[in-house]
Amino acid sequence: MRLLLIEDDREAARFVLKGLRESGHTVEHAADGREGLFRATEGQYDVIITDRMLPHLDGLAIVQLLRQQGRDTPVLVLSALGTVDDRVRGLKAGGDDYLTKPFAFSELLARVEALQRRRSGFQTATTLRVADLELDLLGRRVTRAGRALNITAREFTLLEFLMRRAGQVVTRTMLLEGVWDLQFDPQSNPVEVHISRLRQAIDRDFDKPLLHTVRGAGYVIREEPQ
Amino acid sequence: MQPMENERPLPSSLHTSAFRLALAYCGLFTLGVSALLGAIYLITARALAAQVDNVIMIELEALADEYDREGAPGVAAELTRLQAGWGRAGAAYLLVDRNFIPRAGNLTSWPFKGLPRAQWPEFEIETQRADKPVHHRVRARIFTLTDGYLLVGTDISQRRNFQHSFRLATLWGIGSTALLGGLLGFWLSRRLMLRVRAMSAECELILAGDLSRRLPIAGVHDEFDALALAVNRVLARLDEQTHVLRATFDSTAHDLRGPLSRLRGRLEELLRSAALPEPAGASVERALQDLDRVQRTLTTLLQIAQAESRAPLADSARVNLGALAREIAALYEPAARDQGLRLHCDAADAFLTGSRQLIAQLLSNLIENSLKHGGGEIHIEVHDSGSGARLTVSDRGPGIAPQDRERVLRPFVRLAGGSTAGSGLGLSLVAAIARLHEAQLSLKDNTPGLRVTLRFPLPAG
C-alpha cells in the first residue's frame, strides 16, 4: 500500500513510519499541514494518515480541502483529543476514521488496512465465504461444511463484520465501533466473551479453527496455512 | 445530582422578615405619633385653660377694684356697660346679694346651691339659638364682697369642641399612619422578596453548574446590590479558578500524551524487534498493559472534565434510552453469565435528548460497576415516567453505606474493603454525564445491594 503520514512530532512519526514499512507498506512523510496538503493533492495514496493538530494547517482542514477537490482518498485522523465527543466531532468533519494518541501500533495498522479495503469495495455477493464457512446474507443462515450452525442475531452481525474483513486483523475497538456502534473503550472487555461464544459456534465441532486471536492486536477470521 | 433535601419554598410576602420589620416599624411609629399628638393636646389644653383662667382673674380683679371704689352700684353699672359694649365672647357675669338674689349681670339666676367649695366651679347654662336650647359649660371664679358675691365666668364649650376635634384628628392620624405603614410594608416586603427570589433562582442555576452566571444587580446601590456584588466577586473568583484548574488539567493531560505516545512507540518497537530473551519480553508486555491503564485513566479524566465543562455536545440528538439499555445489556450479558451473574434487562422505550455515546458509556460504567461489586442478579430497568426517562440499575452486591453514597461519586474515591481493581473514576464519570444531561442521580439501598436511579428530563422539542 502507498501511504502518506502527516505528523509534526518527529519521534512519533519515526515509530509509525518504521512500523508501517516493516509491515510492507510504502510510506511518505510530511512534517506540517501545508506540505501534507501539497503531497496529498499531488500524489496518489491508498490511505492518508494525518495528525489533527499541525503547524500551518489543521488536520481536519486538510480533510475538508481534499474533499472539496473531489478527492475521496480515505483519511485516518490521529489526535491527542481523546474524548467521545472529540471522536464524534472528528468523524463529522469528514475523517474516515479517528484514532486517539497514544495508540497501539497494531490498532493503527488494522485501521489503515481496513480503510484501504473499504475503498476497494465490499463483496457485493449475497454469500460470504471463508474456507468451508458460509454466511448467507439474505437467508441470514450460517453453514459450515454444509451443516447449519445455530447462532444468535448478534453473533451473525459479528461474524458478518469479521468475514467481510477476512484475513485482516480486526481490533476490539473496531468491533465495538462497527458492531455495537460504541465510540469508547469499556474498562472490561465484553467483546472477548462474544468472540469466544462465536468461536464455540463455528469452530468447536471442526478440526480447522477459523477464528483466531492475534495477540496484542485483535481477531482475524482466516484459513491458516497448513 | 443528589436531590436537595433541605429545600424549602420561599415564604409568601406576609411571612418575610421585611414585612415583619415593616410591621414593627409601623407599630412603633404609630405609638410615637400617638404620644406626640397626646403631648400636643395636653399642652394646648392646659395653655387654653390657663388663658381662660387668666382672663377671668384679670376681669375679676378689675371689678373688685370697682367695687372698692364705687360699691355694688358701681359694679352693676360696669357690668351693664360691659354687656352693652363689645364684651369678650362667652363671658358670664353675675352680681348677687347675700341671699344670692341677682342684682346685675347676664345670668338670670345664681347657678349654685349656696357658695360652691371649688375654687373654679363649673356649671351649665342654657341659651336659645334658633328656638333650640343650647347648653354651654361655664367655668367661673367667685369673689366674696362685703354685701354679696361676684361671679365671672367663661363659656368653655368652645374648648370642648376643640378637644373633640383634636381627638378625632388624632384617631384619623393614627389610623391612616397604620394603614399607610402596613401598605408600605407589604409593598416593600414584596419588592424585596421578588429580588431575593430572583437571586435564589439564579443561585440554583449556578449551583447546577453554570459558573458563568451572576446575581442580578438592580442598580439602586442598596444593601442587596452590595450583597449581590460581593457574591458576584466570589463567583468570578471561583469561575476563574475553575478555568485555571481546567486549563491546567487539560494541558497537562495533553502534554502527557506526547511522552506516553513515544513510550508506547519504543516499547512496541522493542517487542517487534528480534526476539527478546523471555523475562524481558514479558516485562515489556506488562509495561504496555500498565501504559494502557494510565491511558485509560487519563482519557476518563478528560472525559469527566469535558462533561463538567458543559461544552455543547457534538452528537446531541433524541436518544431511545430503552433501546440503548437493551443493546448495552446484550453486550455485557455473556460476560455476566461467565461470571456466574444474571443480567436482566426490562427496558421500555423512553426518550431523552443527549449524546448517545455518553449515555452508552454511562450505562456501561454502571453495569461494569455492578459486575465488579455485585453478586447474584443485576437488574436494568428503563421506563417513561411521563416526566422523563427513568433508568435503574440495581445489584445484590455489598451496596454502599449511606454516608459514602455522595463521596463515591467524586473522582478517585475507593471505598475501604472494596476491590482495588478499576480506576475509581467509573461512578464519577456517571455523575458527570448525568449532570451534563441534567439528570438526577441517586444511590439507594437495594436491601441488599446498590440501586442507582437516574431521572432524565423530558426530551427537548
Image (cartoon, coloured by chain):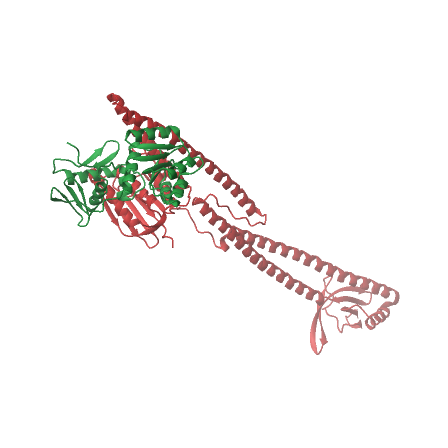
Could you tell me residue B75's position as x and y percent?
84, 68
Quadrant of res A27? top left
The outermost residue toward the top is B277
Quadrant of res A79? top left
**Quarter of the figure that contains the C terminus of chain A:** top left
Could you tell me residue B325's position as x and y percent?
28, 47
Question: Chain coloured green: which letter?
Answer: A
Of the pair B432 and B174, the residue shown nearer to us: B432
**Quarter of the figure that contains the N terminus of chain A:** top left
Of the pair B244 and B404, the residue shown nearer to us: B244
Question: Chain coloured red: which letter?
Answer: B
Could you tell me residue B122's position as x and y percent?
71, 65
Q: Is residue B377 above or below residue A25?
A: below
Residue B67 lies left or right of residue B51; in this view the side is right
Quadrant of res A157? top left
Of the pair B222 and B119, the residue shown nearer to us: B222
Q: Is residue B314 above or below residue B166?
A: above
Residue A92 lies left or right of residue B46; in this view the side is left
Q: Is residue B383 above or below residue B45?
A: above
Q: How many marks?
A: 0
Residue A224 showing in the rendered view: yes
Residue B1 showing in the rendered view: no
Residue B12 lies left or right of residue B280; in this view the side is right
Q: Is residue B122 above or below residue B255?
A: below
The outermost residue toward the right is B69
